[in-house]
Structure formats: C-alpha cells, structure tokens
Image (spheres, rainbow, N blue to C red):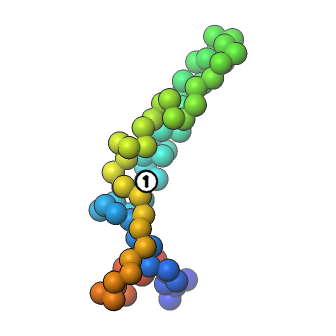
Amino acid sequence: MSRSYRKNPILGNACPESEKKDKTLANRALRRINKVEVLKDSEIFSLKREVSDVWCFPKDGKQRCFTKEITWRWLRK
C-alpha cells in the first residue's frame, strides 16, 4: 500500500487526523458505567450519547475540497 492515494478529496475541518483516541475513551467510560449498572442489577443502561459529547471532540467533521490547490500530500493516506 505504499502507493495508495485517496480517490476523493474529503478532508477533516480541524487539525487532528482522526478521533480514534476520543472514541476509545468514550467507549471505555461507557463500558465502565454499564459494568457498574450490571453489578447493581439495573434494567436501564447508559447510551454513548449520555456518557460523551461529540461536540467536545477536536475534529469538527469532514468536508469535500473543490479547490484546485489540493496537493499530493493531502491525498496521501
């Protein structure tokens, strides 16, 4: 895969490349809270939206770049 490039110029709006670390922490917190609920014999479990807020993640979504100023570095995987 040393010569692989993106076919479509869709890039993130902010500096971070991915939200993997934030998603990992959110899922870890969700599992921890639900594990406590299981030990309490609760019927109601938490959702991921209740534990974490997507708006607090550093990346603000994606957008398609229509400009002709796209360099090969942006399209590099």
Front-most of residues 8 and 35? 8
Name the side, left or right, on which 68 lies relative to 75: left
Residue sitting at the far top = 40
Residue sitting at the far front = 66
Residue, disc 1: 19
Q: Is residue 2 visible?
A: no
Please report the residue visible at 58 percent of the width from the left and 26 percent of the height from the top.
46
Q: Residues within 10 Å of mark 1 (few under 14, many from 20)?
A: some
Estimate the x, y position of residue 35 in percent, counting from the top left. Answer: 61, 23
Name the side, left or right, on which 32 lies relative to 16: right
Please report the residue visible at 50 percent of the width from the left and 80 percent of the height from the top.
8
Image height check: is 51 above or below 72?
Answer: above
Please report the residue visible at 63 percent of the width from the left and 10 percent of the height from the top.
40
Estimate the x, y position of residue 47 in percent, counting from the top left. Answer: 58, 31
Estimate the x, y position of residue 58 in percent, counting from the top left. Answer: 33, 51
Q: Is residue 70 visible?
A: yes
Name the side, left or right, on which 35 lies relative to 50: right
Front-most of residues 39 and 6? 6
Element at label 1: loop
Estimate the x, y position of residue 12 in percent, counting from the top left. Answer: 38, 65
In which quadrant will I find the N terminus?
bottom right
Which residue type does callout 1 highlight? Answer: Glu
Please report the residue visible at 52 percent of the width from the left and 83 percent of the height from the top.
7
Give the number of callouts. 1
